[in-house]
Amino acid sequence: MKTAKIAFILSLALLPIAGWAKLKTLVVGDMVLEPEDTLTFTVGEMPDEIGGLPVFSEYLPDGIEVEWTGKKFKTPKAGSVKYSKKEGDFIATRDENPCGFKMSINKKSGKVSGSFKVYVQKSEKKVKSYTAKVSGYLGSDLVVTIKKVGSFEATLE
C-alpha cells in the first residue's frame, strides 16, 4: 500500500516535467519559433472614425507581443475601455492589452486567426466597440476585417 502511495506522489511530482517535454518548436516556412519566443502584432492603416464616431487609436493592438509557449500563442491579459467618473475620461482596464487582442494558430498549416476590439466614442461618457477579426498565415501579411467597415492590413513578425 505504501509503495502505491509513493508511486502516485512521484507521478504527480513528475507531471510538470512531462508537460514540459511536450513543448515544441514551431516551424512554418522559414520561420522557426522556440518556446518563449515572441512576435509583435502591428496594425496598418486603420480608420480614424467608424460610423462618423472617432476611433480611440491609442487602444488599438499596435505593438502587442504574442508569445509562443510551445503549445499555443499567448497574449497579455485582456482588458477593455470604459468611462471613469473618477478620472473624468476614458481609461483602459489593462495597459498591455486594452483592446482584448487574442491570437491562435493552426500548427500544421500556419494559419493564424484572432480578434480585438476597436473602440469609438459614442457620446461624452459612452464608448462603443466593434469586433475586428484577424486572419492569414504566419510569415505573411494578415487581414483585419471589421464588418460593415472594411479590411485592413496587419503583420505578426
Image (cartoon, rainbow, N blue to C red):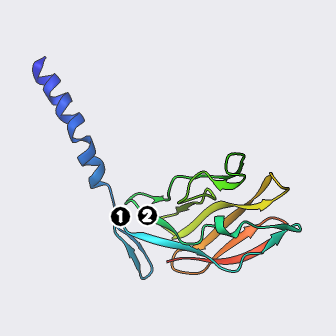
Apparent side of residue 91 relative to residue 107 in the rendered image (left or right)? right
Specify the quadrant of the image occupied by residue 92.
Answer: bottom right
Q: Label 1 amino acid?
A: Glu
Q: Which residue is mark 2?
A: 67
- Across and down, in percent, residue 113 comes to 60, 64
Which residue sits furthest top?
A: 1
Between 108 and 14, the one lying in front of the other is 14
Instruction: Please count the marks in the image.
Output: 2
Residue at image coords 13%, 17% = 1
Above or below residue 34? Residue 91 is: above
Q: Label 2 amino acid?
A: Glu
The earlier-in-sequence mark between 2 and 1 is 1
- Across and down, in percent, residue 85 comes to 72, 46
Q: Residues within 10 Å of mark 1 (few under 14, many from 20)?
A: some
- Across and down, in percent, residue 129 comes to 76, 56
Q: Which residue is mark 1?
A: 36
Between 6 and 63, the one lying in front of the other is 63
Specify the quadrant of the image occupied by residue 122.
Answer: bottom right
Residue at image coords 19%, 29% = 9
User: Under tag 2, what secondary structure?
Assistant: strand
Which residue sits furthest right?
A: 52
